[in-house]
Image (cartoon, helix red, strand yellow):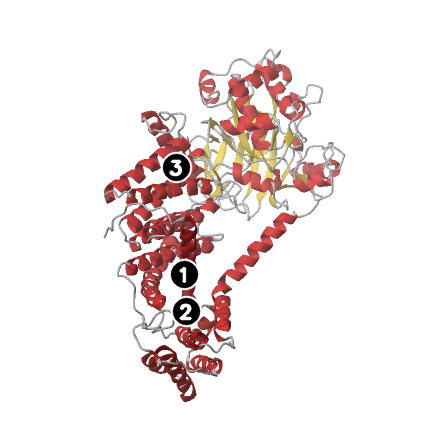
């Protein structure tokens, strides 16, 4: 492989290793494979253009155009000319995706889902960084500045993730990629000067200092790479520490306030999308408590704690609208659309949040009428939510809430008039990308219904019991059009899929719909309080009926409870007398069986029960951690432990091979044995800080090792004895066999250890400097392989090329 080829390969590897730092930010991580394939094509185009050859600027232009075509073919195929050429419509679509991706970065918690916008930002960013690295390091032959775009890529990832997790590992990989690029450039530059003379020809057993042809070649790039690498690593450590971290979002445990502005009623809120964290919490092995409460409601199964509503559907995802914030009113106005004819009862609840639960939206029963809480909180009227201001979170919050239990009858919902035009216009929008199967399925399921209420109940029953759907938290999350179409086909998912699909179907039928996110009622404790855990996280659809307002439905099987107004044969129940003491009322057991009593053990372990009554049949016994997981974890642990020890292990193996006794008495055997001992002395001195000098004779090299290594008299004699043997085998007409080389080498090594400080001794063992010779060994093996290949198959294909400075 030519020098340019090695540089291009190292530039590709360095970019991909730096891009690995972005993996913890997004789930799933399949985008990195897509980026790797496109990056390989981009690098290949550059390599072909340099072989043609083309002027440098034309090479860069060709790579950029190919990059644009690749991104168009992957992300805007339907809008592109003939499927891959970037026309005006495709460019507009890519711009829209970039804007959506920028919004997603601020809206999603880490790890965020790989939406189309985020994938375009990730893949496009990697390709642009790869183009910059390839241009600087390969086209213009200047690898040192190529570290700046690599540093930028890692710094963005470190800044977004806050430097947590396994950031040090990604930093190490990115740094190794950069140093590999520097080493390749150094070797390439030196190779342009021709073959470097190191004192004598290469021996059968390998050269030595003063004798090793390849040793001289390796030293210059090693020194250059070490100096520039140390500077780059120092900058990379300092820059991410100065970058602001992106706060985690809903249920992520690291959220912060999103509200802005002071007490003047200004500011907006950009909601954090909860869906990825919600799925993670549903799959937690332990249902850790996030809050507890006491309430005087007689229907605890309907006491949902609502955080926010996602009301915008753009085809890629559901998200919350940007809304204006106001000061929290002493008494919150009644909910929109609620008629005085509908029965309501006001209840009171005391809620305590765990200190480990931090997010900027305050969980409230809906609709709340009064909230008494300390701290900096703002009020968002459309969603009736409270949002933390200037870093205020729910951590350790204790608050009292008055809320309404709305009790519409089936007749009132059935007789509801049309919603106001503003509500219809905002909450019945569906994107053009929504599959036709959604509308067709909604029409089929609701066939025969005479009003919106009957249509809503039919949709709920279709998902909850009649459509053959099953609850599965292992299904990939997603709320976009593609995810909805896939869910209707596979009929497997969790609350996210059920709620968003029902809301989308309702919108296609002209029913205003949105999705609320929060918690199901939780589990009653022995002391009368109710505990809400991570696995109580939930999403459910809210449909608007004029005269009732936003109304909860429950399409998810085995989760939560279907509202009484959707079960005509069930008693509606009522609220307790608000004048009763809260603690006494909450201590009364519910008439319905609790989840812990009626839910099978296995479903409880999976978090599939909530407060709903599940089937009495227990599932199969828990098989424990999968064997494949154990194997992969063990292999990963082995790699982590072994990787830092590789230089030491390689050095021990090389020393043992060099000092192994040989019974051969031929001149070649004598030469090999003598030069191997000499090379071991040089490398031992190198490990202890005495760098080789390929321009010195063996005798001068021996004197230099004695002086810089501060060897004692016995060790100095051993070095000069071996150096004399080297001169004998190289220059004498008939080399004489020597003896005791292994003892001389051990004497020199012991003296070097004694004279060195503690750090140098430890480094000589754990991270020996001479291990860099492994690069020469790999290069030599590659040369042997290419020679054998050329001899067998007639050589490598050659392109016309020219030397560019």
Examine the image and state in which quarter residue 768 appears: bottom left
Q: Does 498 sit left or right of 728 as displayed?
A: right
The residue tagged 1 is 780
**From what the image shows, is residue 3 above or below residue 118?**
below
Kindly identify which residue carries mark 3. Answer: 102
Q: CA distance from mark 1 to mark 2?
A: 10 Å
Between residue 262 and residue 101, name the one nearer to us: 101
Look at the image and tell me whether residue 97 can be seen.
Answer: yes
Nearest the eye: 107 or 99: 99
317 with respect to 142 (left or right): right
Pick the residue in front: 715 or 95: 715
Locate residue 370, reporting x and y percent. Answer: 53, 33
In this rendering, the answer to whether 11 lies above or below 646 is above
**Does dot 1 land on a helix, a strand or a loop?**
helix
Q: Residues within 10 Å of mark 2 (few under 14, many from 20)?
A: some
10 Å crowding of disc 1: few (<14), some (14-19), many (20+): few
| The quarter of the displayed image where residue 570 is located | top right
The label nearer to you, 2 versus 3, is 2
Horizontal relation, residue 433 to residue 619: left or right: left
Label for residue 380?
Answer: none
Q: Where does the image place residue 574, in percent across and percent down from the top left? A: 67, 26
Question: Residue 520, located in which quarter of the rendered image?
Answer: top right
Residue 542 can be seen in this image: no
Secondary structure state at the residue bearing disc 3: helix
Residue drawn at x 29%, y 61% as measured from the top left: 190
The reply to whether dot 1 and dot 3 touch (C-beta < 8 Å) is: no
In three-dimensional space, the C-alpha distance between marks 1 and 3, rounded to whole angstroms, equals 48 Å
Identify the residue under disc 2: 206
What residue appears at the point 37 percent right and 39 percent down from the top-left corner? 124
Badge nearest the viewer, 1 or 3: 1
């Amino acid at each position: 492989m030519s020098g340019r080829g090695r540089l291009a390969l190292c530039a590709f590897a360095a970019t991909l290793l730096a891009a690995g730092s972005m993996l913890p930010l997004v789930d799933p991580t399949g985008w990195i494979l897509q980026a790797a394939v496109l990056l390989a094509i981009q690098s290949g185009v550059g390599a072909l253009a340099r072989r043609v050859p083309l002027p440098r600027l034309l090479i860069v232009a060709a790579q950029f155009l190919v990059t644009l075509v690749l991104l168009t073919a992957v992300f805007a195929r339907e809008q592109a000319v003939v499927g891959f050429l970037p026309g005006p419509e495709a460019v507009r679509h890519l711009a829209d995706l970039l804007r959506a991706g920028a919004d997603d970065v601020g809206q999603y918690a880490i790890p965020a889902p790989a939406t189309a916008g985020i994938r375009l930002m990730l893949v496009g960013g990697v390709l642009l960084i790869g183009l910059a690295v390839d241009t600087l390091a390969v086209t213009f032959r200047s690898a040192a500045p190529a570290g700046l775009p690599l540093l930028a890529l890692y710094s963005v990832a470190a800044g977004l993730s806050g430097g947590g997790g396994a950031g040090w590992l990604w930093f190490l990989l990115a740094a190794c990629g950069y140093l590999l690029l520097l080493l390749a450039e150094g070797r390439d530059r030196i190779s342009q000067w021709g073959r470097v003379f190191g004192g004598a020809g290469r021996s059968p057993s390998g050269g030595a200092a003063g004798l090793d042809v390849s040793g001289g070649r390796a030293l210059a790039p090693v020194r250059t790479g070490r100096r520039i690498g140390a500077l780059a690593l120092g900058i990379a450590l300092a820059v991410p520490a100065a970058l602001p971290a992106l706060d985690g979002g809903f249920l992520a445990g690291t959220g912060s306030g999103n509200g802005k502005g002071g007490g003047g009623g200004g500011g907006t809120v950009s909601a954090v999308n909860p869906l990825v964290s919600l799925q993670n919490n549903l799959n937690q092995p332990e249902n850790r408590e996030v809050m507890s409460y006491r309430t005087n409601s007689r229907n605890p199964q309907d006491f949902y704690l609502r955080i926010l509503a996602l009301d915008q559907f753009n085809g890629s995802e559901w998200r919350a609208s940007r809304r204006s914030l106001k000061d929290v009113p002493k008494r919150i106005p009644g909910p929109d659309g609620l008629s005085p004819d509908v029965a309501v009862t006001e209840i009171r609840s005391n809620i305590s949040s765990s200190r480990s639960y931090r997010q900027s939206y305050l969980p409230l029963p809906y609709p709340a009428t009064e909230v008494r809480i300390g701290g900096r909180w703002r009020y968002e009227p459309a969603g009736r939510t409270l949002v933390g201001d200037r870093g205020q979170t729910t951590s350790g919050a204790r608050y009292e809430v008055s809320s309404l239990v709305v009790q519409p009858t089936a007749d009132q919902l059935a007789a509801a008039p049309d919603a106001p035009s503003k509500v219809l216009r905002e909450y019945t929008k569906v994107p053009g990308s929504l599959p036709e199967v959604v509308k067709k399925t909604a029409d089929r399921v609701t066939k025969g219904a005479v009003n919106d209420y009957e249509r809503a109940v039919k949709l709920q029953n279709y998902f909850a019991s009649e459509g053959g759907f099953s609850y599965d938290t292992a299904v990939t999350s997603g709320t976009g059009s593609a995810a909805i179409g896939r869910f209707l086909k596979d009929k497997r998912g969790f609350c996210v899929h059920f709620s968003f699909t029902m809301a989308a179907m309702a919108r296609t039928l002209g029913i205003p719909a949105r999705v609320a996110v929060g918690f199901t009622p939780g589990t009653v404790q022995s002391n009368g309080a109710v505990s809400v855990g991570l696995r109580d996280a939930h999403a459910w659809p809210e449909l608007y009926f004029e005269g009732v307002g936003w109304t909860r439905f429950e399409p998810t099987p085995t989760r939560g409870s279907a509202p009484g107004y959707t079960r005509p044969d069930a008693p509606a129940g009522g609220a307790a007398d608000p004048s009763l003491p809260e603690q006494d009322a909450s201590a009364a057991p519910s008439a319905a069986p609790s989840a812990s009593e009626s839910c099978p053990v296995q479903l409880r372990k999976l978090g599939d029960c909530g407060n709903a009554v599940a089937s009495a049949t227990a599932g199969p016994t828990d098989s424990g951690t999968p064997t494949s997981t154990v194997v992969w974890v063990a292999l990963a642990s082995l790699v982590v432990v072994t990787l830092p020890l590789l230089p030491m292990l390689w050095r021990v193996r090389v020393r043992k091979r060099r000092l192994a006794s040989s019974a051969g008495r031929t001149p070649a055997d004598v030469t090999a044995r003598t030069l191997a001992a000499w090379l071991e002395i040089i490398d031992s001195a190198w490990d202890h800080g005495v760098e080789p000098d390929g321009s010195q004779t063996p005798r001068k090299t021996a004197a230099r090792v004695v002086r810089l290594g501060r060897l004692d008299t016995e060790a100095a004699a051993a070095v000069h004895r071996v150096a004399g043997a080297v001169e004998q085998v190289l220059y004498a007409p008939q080399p004489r066999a020597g003896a005791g080389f292994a003892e001389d080498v051990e004497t020199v090594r012991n003296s070097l250890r004694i004279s060195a400080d503690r750090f140098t001794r430890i480094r000589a063992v754990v991270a020996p400097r001479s291990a860099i010779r492994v690069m020469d060994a790999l290069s030599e093996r590659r040369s042997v392989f290419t020679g054998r290949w050329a001899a067998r198959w007639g050589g490598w294909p050659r392109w016309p090329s020219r030397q560019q400075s």
